[in-house]
Image (spheres, helix red, strand yellow):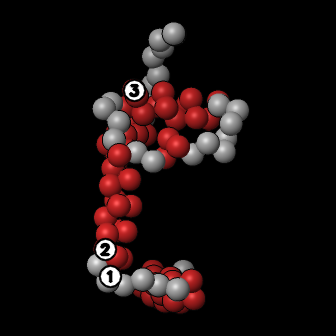
């Protein structure tokens, strides 16, 4: 295994640190090594690395909410809701 030093801007480091935490990594170094490894891996279709314990817990909580009678949306309802949010954002932000 090779070890090297990498320089990041403060902004990139802060973003990497945030993403590392969100994905459940113990350190920014582990997160960056995982990102580089994924990028260089030939089997780009393997998405297992995306299913961190935190994301699985979130998915499980959503499933439990649905099973408990929480609101669900059809594709059409979701499209309409997203379109309404988009229009609202455009109206507020002038785009």
Question: Badges 2 and 3: C-beta atoms under 8 Å apart?
Answer: no
Residue count near mark 2 (Cα–Cα under 10 Å), binned few <14, some 14–19, many ≥20: few
Q: Which residue: 35% across, 46% down?
A: 53
Residue count near mark 1 (Cα–Cα under 10 Å), binned few <14, some 14–19, many ≥20: few
Q: Where is residue 94 in the image (x, y as percent from the top left)?
A: 49, 83
Q: How many marks?
A: 3
Question: Badges 3 and 1: C-beta atoms under 8 Å apart?
Answer: no
Q: Mark 1 points at which residue?
A: 70
Q: Which mark is residue 92?
A: none
Q: Name the residue under label 2.
A: 65
Q: How far apart are marks 2 and 3 (CA)?
A: 35 Å
Badge 1 marks a residue whose secondary structure is loop
> Which callout, 2 or 1, points at the residue further toward the start of the chain?
2
Q: Mark 3 points at which residue?
A: 29
Q: Choose top left, top right, bottom left or bottom right for residue 21.
A: top left
Q: Is residue 49 something that shows in the picture?
A: yes
> Which callout, 3 or 1, points at the residue further toward the start of the chain?
3
In the rendered structure, the answer to whether residue 48 lies left or right of residue 56 reads right
Q: Is residue 29 above or below residue 71?
A: above
Q: Where is residue 66 in the image (x, y as percent from the top left)?
A: 36, 76
């Amino acid at each position: 295994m090779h070890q090297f030093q990498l320089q990041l801007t403060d902004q990139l480091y802060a973003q990497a640190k945030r993403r590392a935490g969100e994905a459940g990594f113990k350190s920014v170094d582990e997160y960056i090594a995982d990102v580089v490894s994924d990028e260089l891996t030939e089997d780009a279709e393997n998405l297992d690395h995306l299913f961190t314990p935190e994301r699985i817990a979130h998915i499980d909580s959503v499933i439990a909410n649905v099973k408990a009678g929480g609101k669900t949306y059809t594709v059409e309802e979701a499209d309409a809701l997203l379109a309404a949010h988009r229009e609202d954002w455009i109206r507020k932000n002038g785009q």
